[in-house]
Image (tube, helix red, strand yellow):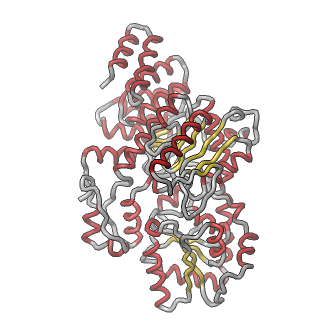
Amino acid sequence: MATKLTTEGEALVAEGNVAEARDRFLAAVKDDPQDKEALNNLGVIAFKEKQIDHAARYFSQCLSIDPFYLDGVLNFCELLKATDNLGGAENLLEMAATRYPENEEVKLLLGEAQSCGAPTVDGAVTARLVQADASSPESSATLTKDPSGPLADKKVLHAPFEIAGCIERITRHLRQDNVNATSANYYDSWLQYKCDVNLNVSNMSPEDRNRAIDKFAREAIDKYDIFHFHFAHSLYPDLRDLKELREKGKKILFSFWGSDARGVEWIMYQQARFLGHRPPRPYAITRQQYQIHKAINLYADVLIGLESIPRGIWVRGFADTAQWSLEGKQACLKKNLITRDPKKTYFVHAPSNQFKKGSAILMRLLKECRDEGMPIEVLYVSQLAPAKAREIYAYGDYAIDQVGVGTYGLFGVEMMCWEIPVLVYHTALFDRLRGNPPVIHITKENFKSRIERCIEMKNNGEIDELGAESRKWAIEKEDVTLAIPEYMRIYRDLVEGKQILQYINRAWYEEESRLQRGFKSEFYRYMIEHNVFEELSVEVREYDKDLYY
């Protein structure tokens, strides 16, 4: 239902008083940033005034709030059609067609969009939000090493949750390209990651922690222009700063890295499938994560990630492959920390979180292989600082990454850099998204045969070829230097007031709709009845009875 300000604005439009109507709509959005009707009307006004970028921004915000809002869908499609980009709306129109099957205008536009063709990323991706080619080399070629460009006087903050060293790594490379970037990490752990600013609040009392965070946040809000947040955290744990940042005209980005876009049920679901079970799909994220995502989606300019977020883009490249040179590997081996038996094949596994990586499952299967007489040894690396851990990694012939996600993580990429082939449970979806990486696919069913094959490849020398292919892949496809120009392009476009190419994730909205309707998944019932939790070596967790039977 339209708000009073929006209704007044629509009446003014009908009278021909567009300027005053725009003021009403802007006031409505300031009062309620989720006023989709006001955003849609602002988009229509901007479109009629041929302000395409502004129109795209308003329609994007409108559809981010409700991708099924018919007026917004139709108006956005008219903009895309006028700019020869209607093909990008094909999946958005498919969604609208399921909701409004009798709407002739939707049917007509869908037919036109299908005839155009559009790029998609699996079935979850549904619509372009703006007309810009993020993959165009020209779009980022002028950004690097350009101190006089639009980012010259801008300060960028990456904060506040360091995950796998990503914040430090990205900001270091941004500075190499003359971007004034600062890394800040609130929380410390056994991984001992260090950023430019380290609050180390983990062991503080609640009162001291709040004071430290508030002091840093108040200074940061005034100091920085672009806020690039990580792991679904912002300056304050309750995300209260986002509204203020938006009102002050700051640019806001969120990068999602894993468990911030993946609930515990989804991890257990993947592990169950690894074991050969076929449980009903659970909710991909938790009820609390949905609330966090909705707040972030409301205020953020750009979301970056691969899965289970309302909208976003995927920026490829997150490993600093230069720090994983073959010379560095040899330097570790020269320390002779481990005496290897040449008759055995060594598998290294290094979980940052044993449950999430499925370590209990993998160790059990590896033990069965050893008990059957296979000449293998396991290098299990846990609770070691990165510098110490890498000294052990070097002795692995193969790396076993994880079975709870459906793809590899940073550890897998780093091992590829060292020409150590990676075994991982890798789903068909991530094969497509990542372009069929040279990993060894494992399931419980094929595990022993894969281990036997690994032993054979080591003995006949085939491991060297696979190792070289893995290193080449990591450098060409997963290096952080691939991401830096893209981050810079995004920052530049935001500073210049341009809308960023993003996609609406239909799967997120469909799950959120099921949550609101009270749909219950049979996931836990299946897992309990089939004793899957016992196979996972975990207790049956307390779960949301409103979401699961």
- Residue 209 is situated, as x and y percent measured from the top left of the image, at 49, 49
In the rendered image, the quadrant that contains the C terminus is: bottom left
Of the pair 78 and 372, the residue shown nearer to us: 372
- Residue 70 is situated, as x and y percent measured from the top left of the image, at 35, 30
Number of callouts: 0
Of the pair 438 and 299, the residue shown nearer to us: 299
Of the pair 37 and 96, the residue shown nearer to us: 37
The residue under the point 67% across, 81% down is 337
In the rendered image, the quadrant that contains the N terminus is: top left
* Quadrant of the image occupied by residue 360: bottom left
The residue under the point 47% across, 78% down is 363
* Quadrant of the image occupied by residue 101: top left
Residue 146 can be seen, yes or no: yes
The residue most toward the bottom is 373
The residue under the point 54% across, 77% down is 380
The residue under the point 34% across, 45% down is 512
Vertical comparison of 538 with 204: above or below: below
Of the pair 174 and 111, the residue shown nearer to us: 174
Vertical comparison of 419 with 165: above or below: below
- Residue 323 is situated, as x and y percent measured from the top left of the image, at 70, 62
* Quadrant of the image occupied by residue 455: bottom right
- Residue 25 is situated, as x and y percent measured from the top left of the image, at 42, 19
Vertical comparison of 131 with 5: above or below: below
Vertical comparison of 470 with 122: above or below: below
